[in-house]
Amino acid sequence: MSGVEETLNESAGVKGDVEFDVEAEQHIEDSFVMDPTQYMFYRDRKEWADLKPVPQDDGPNPVVKIAYSEKFSDVYDYFRALLKNDERSDRAFALTADAIELNAANYTVWHYRRVLLQALTKDLREEMRYITNIIEEQPKNYQVWHHRRMVVEWLNDPSEELEFIADILSQDAKNYHAWQHRQWVIQEYKLWDNELEFVESLLEEDVRNNSAWNQRHFVISHTTGFSDPAVLEREIQYCLIQIKKAPHNESAWNYLKGMLPDRGLSSQPGLLEKVLELKETHCSTYLLAFLFDCYEDALENGHQKENVDEEERKETLRKALEITELLAQEKDTIRKEYWLFLGRSLKSKYEPSSPSGEPLSDDPEPSAPTSAQQDMN
């Protein structure tokens, strides 16, 4: 074969390869158009050819290098390039959706998306629908809840929020992020009406829902407050009714204690008697711990006053020590040392002392004889 023929054949081969590559590229694009679910890398998209991707920089010697997928690296390499150039375009906005799909907890992506929402004057109602879909898939994602708050603020329209949050809470009534958003909406837009009824419906479903108890305290604290005797008595009665349903539910006892710190547990008329009555039929470690706190509070209040009846004070101390012994030996043995410590502390602080400074005891135990005494015998 002559050199001319070889050159012609080589040229024909090169031309064939070029034609094949063009056809292959066209096939990729056609496939992507026909099937949008087939991902096309940004590096292969003609409209992104002007942007130089910025790779992840893990330093020269990464200790534990994350094995990102090829798609993840592709999206975030171009995201970093956009961020570096501070590009504010529709293509940048579209890319944030891909980045969020891969990692919806990336705060930087959400922040950049908010910048683009305002710079491009995007439809915020459409954005709310987008956020709703993501929260329904990832209801415990902090970043998307924060993003929702920002958009609600921009719209200045909370009309859909309480119903939406109630729907999320119906899936998980203890979702912290949903409750946090609900409290913000209610407080920011003064939507207190009917919130107490909503909380009561949740407690009817699950009296152990600590989040609902917390919300009840939040609502009353920001509306009527607990200083009104009528409100306080209503809430005490409500607590006692709920405690009867589930005596070993700590949430109701915490709520009861949380209402009374300013007044003192022992100062509320009739409360101690009601709890003692409840003790006969619905005793629990939480009830006994509440009684101990009441007795301790009474001792402290009496300690600060003059002309306190000494016999009454001794009787209160005896009851408190009796509670700690019962909890340590029978009802809460896993925390035995804790209750014994509280008993010793209370006894040391409030038990009458002898002139020598040693606490007096109603039933002193004889001390064990020393070795010297034994030898003398």
Image (cartoon, rainbow, N blue to C red):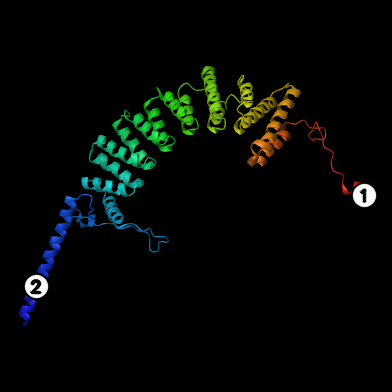
Q: Which mark is residue 375?
A: 1
Residue drawn 39% across the image and 32% down it: 182
> Which is more toward the observer, 60 or 138?
138
Query: Which amino acid type corresponds to the residue marked 2 in the rendered image?
Result: Ser
Label 1 sits on a secondary structure element that is helix
The location of residue 226, given as percent across then percent down, is 52, 22
Q: Earlier in the sequence, mark 2 or mark 1?
A: 2
Amino acid type of the residue tagged 1 in the rendering? Asp
Above/below status of 22 relative to 11: above
- Residue 344 appears left or right of 269: right
Q: Name the residue under label 2.
A: 11
The image quarter in which residue 201 lies: top left
Q: Is residue 64 above or below residue 196?
A: below
Residue lying at the far front of the rendered structure: 281
Residue 35 position, x and y percent, is 19, 50
Q: As rendered, which of 288 and 72 lies closer to the eye? A: 288
